[in-house]
Amino acid sequence: MGRWLMYVYDMKKRSMQEPTFLILTALAAGPQHGYGIITDAEGISGGVTRLQTGTLYMALDRLRSAGLVEPDREEIADGRLRRYYRLTDEGATLLGAETERRRASAAVAAQRLRARLAGGTA
Amino acid sequence: MPARDPAGAAVLERRYRRLLRCYPPAHRAFHREEMLGVLLATARPGQRTPGLGQTVNLAACGLVIRVRRIPGWLAADAGQDALAVVSLIAPAVVFILIALGLGARYATWSARLPFWQLRVPARRASAVPGLGR
């Protein structure tokens, strides 16, 4: 519930929240179905984030209407429908911009931590 | 997938189907079967109930998607944010509850007045025991 509230709160700020980032990153490797996205996202996040089904399809619904993701193909496995999704060019562009943003802020953090460490030992 | 317990799996699937009614019909028509597949694939062996976290998540996400799809009177992208709607509605609900509470209090106090005089003493709310001062 807390995670869900954070999710809604992040949507308000219009920054890319973790589930979206993980879903887009998972699809950057190629089309995947829902369960594949969940297991891939868990791996990408180092086991930290396990997307819940409702959260995944809420994000997919929004990403699809924003044109960042689109259905790729459908398969039947064990009598169940599996729909694959793929990243669109717009989705790849947005993921690239978000990756740059994260890289930049991580670089600042790393640099400050180095400076802090240097200051502490001096 | 709880393959060793087909009856349990059927029970779980029925419960998930019921939960998916939280989603708007258009979303359900497109996503229900694949969502059921994912929900059952992520279920523990022998699991028969969706569990509190999953239930809350599905109900909340269904509500958010329903709110998102309300056209017109919400600005196009305001519909994306259920929190905005909740923060609009919640104070209104609280206000209505308070108004009902005060109304009930006032009604018991002014029960003997004819209805056209009901509004007059409202201006002297401080005279009502427990309301003013």
Image: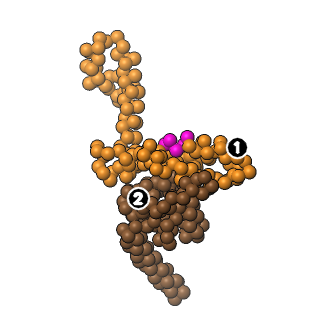
Residue found farthest to the right: B4
Q: Find disc 1 in the rendering and name its residue.
A: B7
Q: What amino acid is labelled 1 in the image? A: Ala
Q: Quadrant of the N terminus of chain B?
A: bottom right
Q: Find disc 2 in the rendering and name its residue.
A: A64
- Label 1 neighbour load within 10 Å: few <14, some 14-19, many 20+: few
Q: Nearer the viewer, residue B88 or A97?
A: A97
Question: Could you tell me residue B73's position as x and y percent?
Answer: 28, 43
Q: Are marks 1 and 2 on the same chain?
A: no
Secondary structure of residue under mark 2: helix
Seen at 58% across and 45% down, the residue is B16
Q: Quadrant of the C terminus of chain B?
A: top left
Question: Could you tell me residue A68's position as x and y percent?
Answer: 39, 64
Q: CA distance from mark 1 to mark 2?
A: 35 Å
Seen at 67% across and 47% down, the residue is B9
Q: Main secondary structure of the magenta part?
A: helix
Q: Chain of mark 1?
A: B
First to last magenta residue range: B18-22
Residue A1 circle label: none
Q: What is chain B's hue in the picture?
A: orange
Q: Chain of mark 2?
A: A
Residue B84 visible at all:
no
Magenta stretch contains residue B20: yes
Seen at 56% across and 50% down, the residue is B36
Q: Nearer the viewer, residue B54 or A9?
A: B54
Secondary structure of residue under mark 1: helix
Q: What is chain A's hue in the picture?
A: brown
